[in-house]
Image (tube, rainbow, N blue to C red):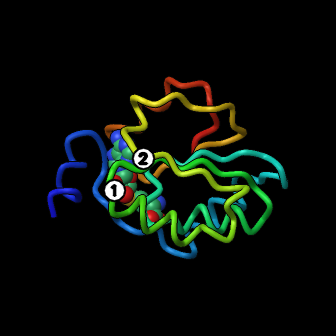
Amino acid sequence: MICFSAVLLVGAPYLPTLGRQVKAVLELADLQSGDTLLELGCGDGKVLIAAARQGINVVGYELNPLLVILSWLRTRRYRKQVRIIWGDFWQKPWPPAEAIFVFLLPKYMSKLNKKNYAIY
Ligand SMILES: C[S@@+](CC[C@H](N)C(=O)[O-])C[C@H]1O[C@@H](n2cnc3c(N)ncnc32)[C@H](O)[C@@H]1O
């Protein structure tokens, strides 16, 4: 419980992305095999898996250690394409990427808009 509520200090709580939202995001991003997608707050790894299945390289950041373990386990088949980083994405370096996916609270979106990335 502490892991899930502590996240509220720096970002959004865990809420799984719906399957149709994942599909819409990947269509909108229009990434090619070999491109890189960052997910800031990768939760249970659902988006990472969907992207990896399309040949996309993905880097997911997650603060909640329980979700890091869950997403790491769920993405083990795609180990070469998926990297999961445990920690606060505001405090971590971001590798070059073609797009970023976030599912956060609106107040964090304006902060992200100042970065020079295509954010979905
Ligand atoms: C709305 S959920 C998105 C979940 C994910 N898209 C999925 O489908 O499982 C937001 C996630 O971002 C994580 N998060 C929030 N702020 C964070 C931060 N500053 N650094 C890393 N992860 C963060 C939360 O722990 C939560 O899992």
Q: Position of residue 71 (x, y in %)?
A: 49, 65
Q: Is residue 57 above or below residue 110?
A: below
Q: Secondary structure at mark 2?
A: strand
Q: Nearer the viewer, residue 10 or 112?
A: 10
Residue 86's tag is 2
Residue in the picture at 54% in, 25% down: 115
Kind of residue sitting beneath label 1: Pro
Q: Is residue 97 visible?
A: yes
From the top left corner, tell me how far across and down residue 21 is, in percent.
Answer: 55, 68
From this viewpoint, is residue 105 visible?
no
Kindly indicate the quadrant of the structure image that contains residue 10.
top left
Residue of label 1: 65
Residue at position x 47%, y 56% in the image? 42
Secondary element type, mark 1: helix
Q: Quadrant of the N terminus?
A: bottom left
Residue drawn at point x = 32 percent, y = 54 percent: 64
Furthest-bottom residue in view? 19
- 88 lies left or right of 5: right
- Using the numbered discs, state the Cα–Cα distance from disc 1 to disc 2 in whole angstroms: 7 Å
Q: Is mark 1 within 8 Å of ligand 1?
A: no
Instruction: Please determine whether, in this image, residue 43 is positioned above or below residue 104.
Output: below
Q: Are marks 1 and 2 in contact (CB under 8 Å)?
A: yes
Local crowd at mark 2 within 10 Å, few (<14), some, or many (≥20)? some
Tell whether 2 sits left or right of 46.
left
